[in-house]
């Protein structure tokens, strides 16, 4: 839909201008990161007369940017030298200035009448929404309605939605796209340390001697972090970069060691690394004695239990199953354990797996056993995906099983505490955890959930097994708050609410390393678009929960949430709007307004929550010890067979953001990425006589999609890769929806498929 011949992509650019842009992109995407700056020059719009600080709204790095303004238009975007990214931004960040003027914005509310979406007033639209929600709650109970949100909403917005649904309406059916993204990392941290969010920080990159990058492609997905890694490598050439990915990605190209393992076998590799660490005595006995407890998942066990558990994971035994030599496994374990500081970085190749939680546990464990933690340059640093998945959703508890600031629905004490903080009667919050993403859409299918507010996410394209859930959406009264009127999900809307985006509204983003930053309002929203917070407040009042939702502006909501955090390990009481206006972000814990924020958690002298006199204290656990779990490998349910001989793995490309509702309209980005294609290994391509452009039908147990091939030689043999941004391909129709039993995060990375040539190029 968003191809070069799509009028939306033109934006009045001449052929000659495209030529210039492409020349710029050749530099940008091909080689040096320095080249990215060139892109800032390709869209001259006149001179800036004033500058405002802001934050990129795309990935979880949360780069600081400076916006040049002239007459209500963003004329220039630059990386902010004073922010943590030290002026580095990627091409998506460089294109931020285009956002407010993109065509296709939703400008007026719309209501479905006789099958068609027709314009309506806000009053008509919101009273219809409130009536349908009220009717459903009255007739079928509070659990017949739901909120499906996003790691791209501001913290104030998710906090308000969570409070309205859990304490007002009385349902825990509050979930969102972070379930698809960060759930395994969050559960992994909680199980290991007793608290969510990373112990370390981006600053650790500047001190590391070894980077263990597993299931992540930061060159394309967290570019300014990858540039920071390369800066470390340039200044300290002995720094070792290891990449574990079944594809030779642009990240792997720049690493010293690439381990192209078979998709889905990482836990075999990690356990074998642990085996080598124990066998070769590379562990840190003192650190273990002081700070670590071992567990088999049920009971506390001793070090001998770990040793005997690891007998099944010798590098030689696992080698054929993982598809790596025993030698490279041993070498990796030695590099990891013996470096003066190892930073692990991982994202969706680990989280989006049926053993996502166990994989997260085991990465944390490798750091604990080797003592590669709680000192500069040594830390397990899970990279977050969206700009506000951490602060906005994990911290505010905007998921079906969570309550704010590390509390959980299933714990009665936690429910009582939250009820008290929110001033609602005991027993208001339902003791039943709500529906996670996949199960929420399954409940629409069979009519258990009858009305849903979808806000700032595009599930019709981003959910796995999307064909099934698109049908389910047809059966539900779907309210979609969206910035663009033609997103895939907008097609299923019964009511479409036009939303303000990014600097058209105000709010806080919380990124990867517990860093909160304020995005200030710089422009007015177009047409009749409103902020998501305004929409939620309006809904609350109409549903007669106005006395619960009394904070109604971003800053007052923030102040309420800030106070709420004070009684928890997520304490950020000291992070006020005033400070965030002056600063380029602050890291919590930050208990009072004179506290500078915490870079390294659990470290005495840095983290204010560590007991005085302690050098390191894992205070999240009752015995103050972090837990090393013995986690057995299990095969993915998606295995190849004669019918489905390939593994399809999925992900992203540098220039496109998720479902491309935004980036697909920016010609520079659209032209750079082109349409999404199925990437093949040379041997597979040769065997099947597949060339660049060969048309294919890719079929799985979930659905069939059609697209073109490209022979990049990057995926390992038997594996094909495709990105999910392209609405013409709608890849997720074919992607499996198996999920981790604990985190409920779907396994987007592993689907067994068949490949058939359909003829034509
Ligand atoms: N350009 C761009 N950047 C983004 C985004 C975007 O849409 N576009 N989205 C943001 C978001 S929300 C997220 S969550 C992150 C995602 O960031 P990443 O996780 O880095 O990106 P992905 O491409 O989803 O997947 C990463 C890698 O996992 C590999 N992989 C697949 N299966 C396996 C496996 O079994 N084991 C291992 N070890 N690796 C495997 C894939 O080959 C892929 O290279 O990116 C963020 N940044
Ligand atoms: N195959 C495959 N599928 C995947 C993944 C994968 O790796 N492989 N990764 C998964 C992951 S990690 C993620 S995070 C999801 C992301 O999936 P989605 O969240 O569905 O993707 P986005 O395109 O970011 O959708 C955000 C929507 O919000 C709209 N929007 C932007 N700003 C605002 C705003 O301020 N307010 C409102 N109301 N709307 C706004 C945008 O126009 C866009 O349509 O995809 C998941 N799907
Ligand atoms: S690295 Fe991420 S946050 Fe930084 S400019 Fe690029 S997309 Fe934006
Ligand atoms: Mo994500």
Image: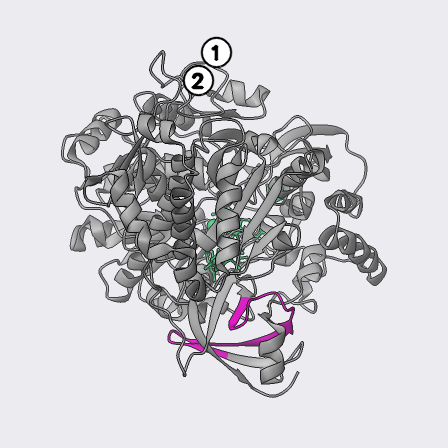
Q: Which residue is mark 2?
A: 574
Residue 386, position as x, y percentages in the image: 50, 45
Q: CA distance from mark 2 to mark 1?
A: 7 Å
The furthest residue to the right: 16
- Identity of the residue drawn at 39% across and 61% down: 317
Q: Position of residue 79 (x, y in %)?
A: 69, 35
Q: Is residue 393 above or below residue 733?
A: above
Q: Is residue 540 above or below residue 29?
A: above
Q: Residues within 10 Å of mark 1 (few under 14, many from 20)?
A: few
Image quarter in which the C terminus is found: bottom right
Left or right: where does residue 16 sit relative to residue 109? Answer: right
Which x, y percent locates residue 758?
56, 86
- The label shown at residue 358 is none
Q: Magenta stretch? A: 698-721
Q: Is residue 212 above or below residue 311?
A: above
Query: What residue do we see at 37% from left, 69% from top?
Result: 638
Q: Residue at coordinates 21% horizontally, 42% vertically from top-left?
A: 170
On the question of residue 124 being in view, the answer is: no
Q: Earlier in the sequence, mark 2 or mark 1?
A: 2
Asked which quadrant contains residue 627, the reply is top left
**Quick check: 211 left or right of 28?**
left
**Front in this rendered view, residue 617 or 489:** 617
Identify the element where label 1 is drawn: loop
Left or right: residue 630 versus residue 156 is: left
The correct choice, above or below, for 495 with respect to 65 in the image is below
Residue for badge 1:
594
State the quadrant of the N terminus.
Answer: bottom right
Does the magenta portion include 355? no
C-beta proximity under 8 Å, tags 2 and 1: yes
| Magenta stretch holds residue 708 | yes
């Amino acid at each position: 839909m968003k191809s070069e011949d799509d009028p939306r992509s033109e934006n009045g650019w001449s052929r000659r201008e495209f030529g210039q842009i492409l020349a710029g992109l050749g530099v940008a995407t091909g080689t040096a990161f320095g080249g990215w700056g060139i892109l800032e020059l390709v869209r001259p719009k006149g001179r800036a007369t004033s500058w405002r600080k802001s934050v990129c709204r795309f990935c979880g790095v949360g780069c600081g940017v400076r916006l040049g303004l002239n007459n209500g238009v963003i004329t220039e975007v630059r990386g902010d030298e004073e922010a943590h990214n030290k002026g580095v931004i990627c091409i998506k960040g460089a294109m931020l200035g285009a956002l407010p003027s993109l065509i296709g914005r939703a400008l007026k509310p719309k209501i479905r009448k006789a099958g068609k979406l027709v314009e309506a007033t806000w009053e008509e639209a919101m009273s219809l929404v409130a009536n349908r929600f009220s009717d459903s709650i009255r007739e079928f109970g509070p659990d017949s309605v739901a909120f499906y949100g996003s790691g791209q909403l501001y913290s104030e917005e998710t906090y308000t939605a969570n409070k309205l649904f859990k304490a007002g309406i009385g349902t825990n059916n509050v979930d969102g796209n972070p379930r698809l993204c960060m759930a395994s990392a969050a559960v992994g941290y909680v199980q290991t340390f007793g608290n969510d969010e990373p112990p370390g920080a981006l600053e650790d990159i500047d001190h590391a001697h070894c980077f263990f990058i597993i299931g992540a492609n930061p060159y394309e997905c967290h570019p300014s972090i990858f540039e920071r890694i390369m800066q470390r490598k340039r200044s300290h050439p002995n720094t070792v970069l290891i990449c574990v990915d079944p594809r030779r990605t642009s990240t792997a190209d720049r690493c010293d060691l690439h381990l192209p393992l078979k998709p889905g076998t990482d836990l075999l590799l990690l356990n074998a690394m642990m085996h080598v660490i124990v066998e070769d005595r590379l562990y840190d006995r003192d650190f273990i004695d002081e700070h670590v407890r071992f567990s088999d998942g049920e009971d506390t066990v001793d070090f001998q239990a770990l040793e005997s558990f690891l007998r099944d994971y010798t590098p030689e035994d696992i080698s054929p199953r993982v598809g790596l030599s025993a030698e490279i496994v041993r070498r990796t374990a030695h590099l990891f354990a013996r470096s003066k500081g190892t930073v692990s970085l991982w994202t969706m190749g680990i989280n989006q797996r049926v053993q996502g939680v166990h994989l997260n546990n085991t990465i944390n464990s490798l750091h604990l056993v080797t003592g590669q933690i709680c000192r500069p340059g040594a830390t397990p640093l899970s990279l977050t995906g969206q700009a506000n998945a951490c602060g906005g959703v994990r911290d505010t508890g905007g998921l079906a099983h969570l309550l704010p600031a590390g509390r959980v629905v299933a714990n009665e004490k936690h429910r009582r505490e939250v009820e008290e903080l929110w001033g609602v009667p005991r027993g208001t919050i339902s003791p039943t955890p709500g529906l996670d993403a996949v199960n929420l859409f399954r409940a629409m299918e069979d009519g258990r959930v009858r009305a849903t507010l979808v806000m700032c996410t595009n599930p019709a394209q981003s959910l796995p097994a999307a064909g099934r859930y698109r049908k389910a959406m047809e059966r539900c009264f779907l309210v979609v708050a969206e910035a663009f009127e033609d997103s895939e999900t907008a097609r299923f809307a019964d009511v479409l609410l036009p939303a303000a985006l990014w600097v058209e509204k105000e709010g806080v983003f919380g990124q990867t390393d517990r860093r909160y930053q304020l995005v200030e309002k710089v422009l007015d929203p177009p047409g009749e678009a409103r902020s998501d917070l305004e929409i939620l407040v309006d809904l609350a009042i109409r549903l007669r929960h106005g006395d619960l939702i009394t904070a109604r502006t971003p800053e007052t909501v923030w102040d309420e949430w800030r106070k709420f955090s004070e009684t928890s390990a997520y304490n950020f009481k000291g992070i006020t709007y005033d400070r965030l206006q002056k600063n380029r972000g602050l890291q919590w814990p930050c208990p009072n307004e004179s506290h500078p924020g915490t870079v390294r958690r659990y470290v005495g002298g840095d983290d204010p929550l560590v007991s005085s006199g302690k050098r390191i204290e894992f205070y999240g656990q009752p015995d103050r010890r972090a837990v090393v779990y013995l986690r057995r490998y299990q095969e993915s349910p998606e295995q190849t067979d004669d019918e489905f001989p390939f593994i399809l793995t999925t992900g992203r490309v540098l220039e496109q953001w998720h479902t491309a509702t935004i980036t697909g309209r920016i010609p520079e980005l659209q032209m750079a990425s082109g349409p999404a294609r199925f990437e093949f290994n040379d041997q597979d391509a040769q065997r099947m006589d597949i060339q660049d452009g060969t048309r294919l039908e890719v079929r799985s147990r979930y659905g069939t999609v059609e697209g073109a091939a490209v022979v990049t030689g990057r995926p390992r043999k038997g594996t094909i890769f495709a990105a999910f941004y392209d609405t013409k391909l709608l890849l997720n129709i074919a992607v499996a929806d198996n999920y981790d039993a604990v985190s409920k995060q779907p396994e987007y990375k592993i689907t067994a498929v068949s490949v058939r040539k359909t003829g034509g190029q």
